[in-house]
Image (spheres, rainbow, N blue to C red):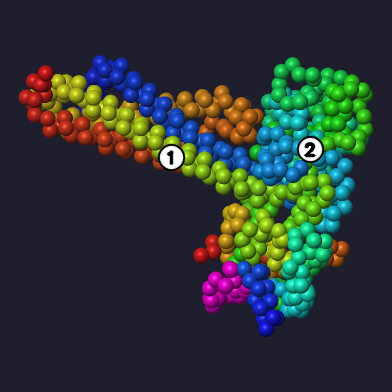
Amino acid sequence: MRRTFLHHSFQLLLASSLGALALPSLANEYKEIEWDELMPEGWKKKVILELTRMRRYGSLMDGDPRADEAYEKLKKVWDAAPPTKTYLGKKIRIAGYVVPLDAERMQSSEFLLVPYFGACVHSPPPPANQIILVKPPKGSKVRTMDAIWVNGTLLEGKTNSDAGTSTYIFNADKITPYR
Amino acid sequence: MLIWLRIAIQSALARRGALLIMVLSTAISVAILLGVFKIRDDTKTSFSNAISGVDLVVGAKGSPTELILYSVFHIGRASNTIPASLEKTLVDLRQVAWVVPVQLGDSYRNYPVVGTSIDFFKRVKAQGRHLQLVQGSALNDPHLFDVVLGHTVAKNTQHRIGEQIAISHGSGSGPKQDHSNSPFRIIGILEANGTPIDNAVFISTNAFDALHDIADSGLQFARLNPDSQASAFFIGLKDRGSVFSVRRQIDSLPNSLMAVMPGVALDELWSSMEIAENALLLIALGVLITTILGITATLLVSLESRRRELAIFRAVGAKPYQLLSLILAEAFMVCVIGILLGWSLLQLIILTTNDHLRKEWGVVSEPSLPNIHDGLALLYLVLVVLISASIPAIKAYRMALSEGLNPPS
């Protein structure tokens, strides 16, 4: 019972409203996926377990050293979130929000795709496996927190064993506004 | 046909005072209209051409937009500086690939002086390309007083490689305490890239510190002292996807730092400018409507005074459509001459003020031919003027002959 509850809140936390709004996938070569599916099953279970353990901190006040410690721990887990192999090298279609990386707007440049609105402003940011580095096709123009659909090929990002961070790289073929 | 042209010109000459005022008012309205459009376009492009390749800009806690405006566009002033020694701390952060210091606050003939390291030329990109030198070489560390000039600076000051220049302490021109005792030597000139880099003068951070030491104490220049200050650091990451994580690490350092994602900050600035942009469009629309109303009003009044003239034309056998085309042709000419005059006026204003605009506002504006946008607005202006001119023209066409010859007093 508790587990289902947590699972739900977890999904709510990460998968964002976008996933819930996603239209049924159309019959084309790009498989439409949800953010939830980018988390490896094993890791998801581990995190849920972790979160369950943390639930006993629920009554702690802000600034409590135990709460800070738990937060630090969570941040480490977030940064080290591994990618799932399921969709690597596959053509997929996913909806998300834009976080631009460059101050330059004349040419299209790389940006990050995140699952929920405001991820660039609010902390904590999403786990590493919920951030996609998008390499857009030429001529596409996006702005901060635009909601978009991206079609393309998902690849594994640079894995840095030292930091443990790994992300997805997404070679985008097509970017369309989310409707 | 020719005779009608002559009559039209003679008639216009007879009323030259009123017509001149009509042309002038059209010219001024057109200049304002095109000016508003130009300001809108130029601010947008000026801000779209910023640096790329920089993942985070680190500065003292404060407003992110201000930090980006100052460190990237060299506009405004820094709210606070941060210790230059932090560079080491930042380099040591996981995922950080490179750190470039940016020191600002000094100027050379009104052009901002940027104190930085050799890495600036290797790492920072403009228009998606690495910085290119037209001549000479980039900064190299052993030579303390080397200077690299941005393209516009070199063009406007006519400096050449090997020339020695004196960089002033503080910003602004005029007789400041200039550092004539610290001879900087130009070693490189950058290629134009349409970014704020074009308008900057680059020196090494050590030289920047030395400049201040000399100004403060008159001592010979010192080495990089531990309490030297930087305005900002540009950071590049090994993996761009880890930007959130690195930003969080920097934010939680004890030095009350702020790490800003340049793209996000620029978009924030953008959305706040959207209001101003819309306001400018509204103003332009207002100007357009006023212009049209003004021209129509003047036409109506002038027609009232031309009643007798038109009636005489009718009396000597002019066909109604000839009167119609006479009036419309005049309105058209007034409009066209006004537009040409207004456009020239605007180009003149841009030519005389673009230096100031660039230095004070960071907006690059060059004289240019009207674009499609301007052309449409002008076409619209001409069409509406012709339509509104046809109202008095039709009135004249339908006016009874006797009524025109014996106007009510």
**For the residue marked with disc 2, what is the amino acid?**
Thr
Q: Nearer the viewer, residue A57 or A126?
A: A57
Please state if A89 lies on the left or on the right of B220 as rendered: left
**Residue in the picture at 10% in, 21% down:** B408
Q: Which mark is residue A47?
A: none
Task: Find out whether residue B404 is within the magenta segment.
Answer: no
Q: Is residue B354 above or below residue B140?
A: above
- Label 1 resides on the chain identified as B
Classed neighbour count for the residue bearing mark 1: other residues with Cα under 10 Å, few (<14), some (14–19), many (≥20): few
Q: Residue furthest left?
A: B402
Residue B285 place in picture, x, y as percent: 40, 38
Q: Nearer the viewer, residue B154 or A179?
A: A179
Q: Which mark is residue B81?
A: 2
Question: Dot 2: what SS?
Answer: loop
* The quarter of the displayed image where residue A173 is located: bottom right
**For the residue marked with disc 1, what is the amino acid?**
Leu
Residue A53 place in picture, x, y as percent: 78, 75
Mark count = 2
Q: Nearer the viewer, residue A45 or B159?
A: A45
Task: Find out whether residue A29 is within the magenta segment.
Answer: yes
Please state if B256 lies on the left or on the right of A145 as rendered: right
Q: Which mark is residue B282?
A: 1
Judge whether residue B391 can be spotted in this image. Answer: yes
**Residue in the picture at 70% in, 50% down:** B261
Q: What residue range appears in magenta?
A: A17-35
**Residue in the picture at 75% in, 47% down:** B258
Q: In which quadrant is the N terminus of chain B drawn?
A: top left
Classed neighbour count for the residue bearing mark 2: other residues with Cα under 10 Å, few (<14), some (14–19), many (≥20): some
Of the two numbered discs 2 and 1 on the same chain, state the one appearing first in sequence.
2
